[in-house]
Amino acid sequence: MTTQHSTSDTEHSTELKIVQDATCTFCGCVCDDIDLKVEGHTITEAKRACVLGKAWFLNHEIEEGASCQIDGQPASFDEAVQRAAEILCNARYPQVYGLSDSPCEAQRKAVAIGDWIGANVDTTTSVCHGPSGMAFQGVGEVTCTLGEVANRGDMIIFWGSNPAESHPRHFTKYSLMPKGLFVPKGRKDRTCVIVDVRKTKSAKAADIFLQIKPRKDFEALWTLRALARDLPLDAQQVERETGIPLATWQDLMQRMKAAKFGVIFFGMGVTMTRGKHANSEALLALTRDMNAHTRFVAKPNRGHGNVTGADNVVSWRTGYPFGVNLSRGYPRFNPGEYTTADTLARGEADAALIVASDPMANFSQAAREHLARIPFVALDPKDTPTTRAAAVSFKVATYGINTGGTVYRMDDVPIPLRPAFPSPHPSDYEVLNELEKRVRKIKAADYE
Amino acid sequence: MSETFILIPGRTSKQGCGISEGKFEENYQKEINTLLVAPDDMERLGLSDGDKVRVTNETGQIEVAVTPAKKDELPSGMLFIAYGDLSSRLMGADTHGSGMPTSKGLDVQLEKI
C-alpha cells in the first residue's frame, strides 16, 4: 500500500444525514442507542448521549495535518509503516501497549505484531483493572450482564467508583433507574449504597453513603466478609480502622442478605490504592461469600470504550489478559515484570508500539523519561504528548465515528460500531494490518 | 511550613470531555492543573481560590493552583486532582508486582508558595 494519506484526500461534504443507534465508545458503558445528526464531516447532535458522549461525538471532526510523521516530519504511509516495522524488528525487548480505544479487529493485528517481534503485549488494563484481572484468577468472578442488573438488581453497591463523573448514563441506563422485569418500580425497588473516601458527585444518588477512611478498603471489605459469616468483631477496632461504626456495617450486611439480587460495581478506588489486587480479591471473595445467602455479583466499572475487548482479544490470542511476554515464542504472564509501567520505569523496553493511549501523560516520571529515550511508534486520532514524542506517528481515523468494527461493553457483551462519516486518515486496522505484513516479511527472512 | 495530606487523583467529567476536545486545549489543561482543597483547610492555611501551592512527596514535586472543593466533598486533610501530567509526577514507579503504580491515596506535603 503506497497511498499518501492527507486531509486533502477527502472533499469536505455538506451532506446531512442521521445515524440511528450509533455506538459511543468513550467509556465502558458503550451506549448503542445514540442518534447522530451528521452534517458533512461534523456531528452536530448526539441524541441521548451523556456529557462525555456529547464531547466525544461533537469534537471528533477530521483532524488537520499529515496522517503519518517520521521524527515530526510528514511522511508517506509507505515510508512510515516501513520505518515503524524496522524500529520494532530491530528491538531486543519491545513493548506493545494501549489498545483499549481501538476495535477488536485492530487489537488482533497488534497482538500478531507482538507475536512476530517477541514483544511484551500489554494494555491499559494493567493501569486500570489489572489488579482485578489478577484477583479474578485468584478467587474467580461471580458475574452477570448489565441487562441482568437492569432487570433484577435490587441492591446496587458502588465501591470506589464515581459513575456520575466517569460513566454518566450508568445509573439511568443500567443500574438504578431502569424499570426491569423483577424491579418493576425501577429506582423505588432498588437500594443504592455508595462506599468511597470522598463524598463524590455520585453520593447524591445513594440511599446509604459510607465514607470510609482512605486506604482502608481492604479492612472494610474484610469487616463485611466477617459479618457475612456471623463472626464476632471488636466494635472499637472496626470503627478505628474503617471510620464507620460496626453497627452501620451490620445494618448494611442485613440489607445485603435480604436482597434478592445484589451487585457490587467497583472502580479505581479499589485497584489504584495500596493493596490493589488484594483489595479486589477481598471484594470478589465477599461477593462469593454472599452467594451462601442470596444471589450477588461483582462488576468492575471499566473506563475506556474497548478495554474489555482488549482483555478478551489478548486472552483468546495468548491465554492471558494483559502483561504477556512472547519473547520465548510462547506466552508467559507476569504483572509487575512484563507490564508497561514496569518495563519502561526500569529502563528495559528498547522500542514500543503504542496504540490509542497516552503513557507520556499518564505514566510515572521514570517511565515517561525512558519512553522519551527509546524509538517508538504511536497511533492516535488526536495530537497527544505521546504522539508528539514518537519516532513514527499515525494520525488515525476515530473508531466508532469514522470506522466500523467490534467493541466489548464492560460486561463482555460485543457490540458493533456504526460509523458516521469517513476519514481521510487510515484506521488503526489499516495501519496495523500493513505493519504486520512488513514485520512478518522482515522476521520471516530470519528463518529462510 | 508544610502539612501532610492524602492526595486522591481521579477522573472528572470535565477532564474526560477535555480529552475529546484535545489535550493541549484550555479546558483539559485547566482541569488537570487545579488542586481541590477542603474549604476548612483552605481557611486554616490562609489560601484563596487561585493561590499556588507546592506539593511534594518522595517521588516528585509540583506547583499547582488551588480551588476550594464543593461543600463536604473532601474531608479535612484530603486533596483531589484530576488525572494528568501533574498527578503523574507524584505517582511512584514501583508497582509492587502488580503492573499498577499506587496512584491514589498518596502521602504528600503541601505548602503555600
Image (cartoon, coloured by chain):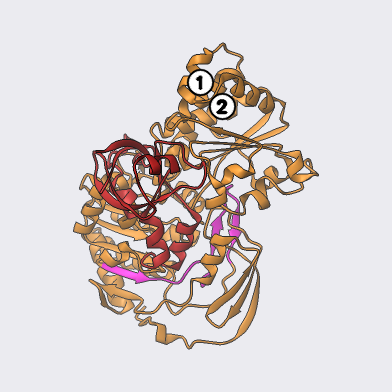
Chain colours: A orange, B red
Distance Cα–Cα, label 2 vs label 1: 19 Å
Residue identifier under label 2: A286
Residue occupying image coordinates x 34% and y 65%: A384
Q: Can residue B56 be seen in this view?
A: yes
* Quarter of the figure with the N terminus of chain A: bottom left
Which of labels 2 and 1 is toward the front?
Answer: 1
Residue occupying image coordinates x 42% and y 57%: A99
Report the predominant secondary structure element of the magenta stretch. loop
Q: Answer above or below: position of B44 versus A256.
A: below
Q: Which of A204 and A327 is in front in this view?
A: A204
Query: Which chain's residue wears label 1?
Result: A
At label 1, which amino acid type do we have?
Glu
Residue identifier under label 1: A239
At label 2, which amino acid type do we have?
Leu
Look at the image and say whether residue A412 sits in the magenta stretch. yes
Q: Answer above or below: position of A168 versus A260.
A: below
Mark closer to the chain start, 2 or 1? 1
Q: Answer above or below: position of A427 versus A267.
A: below
Give the magenta-colored segment's residue range.
A392-417
Is disc 1 placed on a helix, strand or loop?
helix
Is disc 2 placed on a helix, strand or loop?
helix
Query: Which chain's residue wears label 2?
Result: A
Apparent side of residue A376 relative to residue A269 in the rendered image (left or right): left
Q: Can residue A115 be seen in this view?
A: no
Q: Which of A63 and A406 is in front in this view?
A: A63
Look at the image and say whether residue A415 sits in the magenta stretch. yes
